[in-house]
Image (cartoon, rainbow, N blue to C red):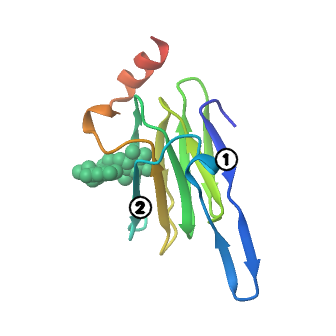
């Protein structure tokens, strides 16, 4: 995987009555979770993201269905498909991300290292590249 992203596999308890996965703050996530949000009812053909973060770290999980995450650390690019509820994609600071190809009924859960602050976003790709190189 390119620098700035990694996969996390969460525990899964498999039983005949169904599966259960769990996520513990310091055990499975390498930062304190300060915010949880989720994307759902995304219309076919829509894309989310299209930005990077100065400080924010996030873990994306396909709780249901599937979607593609296109990642760019300013040097290398990679596309990751998320489709397993027991798998997380950890996206570090200064990684440009765009999410698309949401399957019908998919849910993207995000565990974030901080509360929402708009000033923390880099929404201009040229500014992103300049920040990475600085
Ligand atoms: C990311 C991808 C995966 C809030 O008020 N609080 C929040 O916690 C968030 C995430 C958003 N908002 C507001 C800000 C905007 O008015 O919700 C609106 C849509 O936010 P945004 O355009 O940033 O949504 P996405 O799906 O393009 O991006 C979000 C996250 O912002 C971003 O960090 O990595 O999901």
SS class of the residue under badge 1? strand
Indicate the position of residue 63 as horizontal and vertical percent values: 55, 67
Would residue 67 be found to the left or right of residue 6 on screen? Answer: left
Determine which residue is flagged by label 2: 38
Report the residue marked by disc 1: 7
**Is the residue 56 above or below the residue 126 in the image?**
below
Within 10 Å of disc 2 (Cα), the crowding (few <14, some 14-19, many 20+) is few
Neighbourhood count class around disc 1 (C-alpha, 10 Å): few under 14, some 14–19, many 20 upward: some
* Residue 39 seen in render: yes
Q: Nearer the viewer, residue 90 or 129?
A: 90
Write the residue at 41% across / 16% down: 130
For the point 55% across and 51% down, the residue is 25
- Which corner quadrant holds the C terminus? top left
Mark on residue 47? none
The percent coordinates of residue 92 (x first, y second) are 53, 35
* Residue toward you, 22 or 91: 22
Tag 1 and tag 2, C-beta contact below 8 Å: no
Give percent across and percent down for residue 131.
41, 18
**Residue 68 versus residue 79 in the image, above or below:** below
- CA gap between label 1 and label 2 equals 19 Å
* Residue at x 26% of width, y 38% of height: 118
**Above or below 64: residue 72:** above
Q: Is mark 1 within 8 Å of ligand 1?
A: no
Viewer-proximal residue among 14 and 71: 14
Q: Is mark 2 within 8 Å of ligand 1?
A: no
Q: Where's the N terminus, which quadrant?
A: top right
**Which residue appears at 48% of the width and 61% of the height?**
108
Whichever of labels 1 and 2 marks the residue nearer the N terminus, that label is: 1
Report the side of 74 relative to 7 (left or right). left
* Residue at the farthest top position: 134
Mark 2 lies on a secondary structure that is strand
Q: Position of residue 113 (x, y in %)?
A: 44, 42
């Amino acid at each position: 995987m390119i620098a700035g992203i990694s996969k996390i596999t969460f525990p899964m308890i498999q039983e005949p009555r169904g599966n259960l996965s769990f996520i513990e703050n310091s055990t499975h996530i390498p930062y304190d979770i300060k915010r949880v949000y989720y994307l759902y009812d995304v219309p076919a053909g829509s894309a989310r993201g299209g930005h990077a973060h100065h400080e924010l770290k996030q873990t994306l999980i396909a709780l249901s269905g599937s979607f593609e995450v296109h990642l760019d650390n300013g040097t290398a690019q990679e596309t990751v498909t998320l489709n397993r509820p027991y798998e997380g994609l950890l996206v570090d600071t200064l990684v440009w991300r765009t999410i698309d190809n949401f399957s019908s009924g998919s849910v993207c859960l995000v565990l974030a290292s901080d509360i929402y602050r708009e000033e923390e976003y880099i929404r201009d790709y040229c500014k992103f590249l300049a920040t990475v190189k600085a």
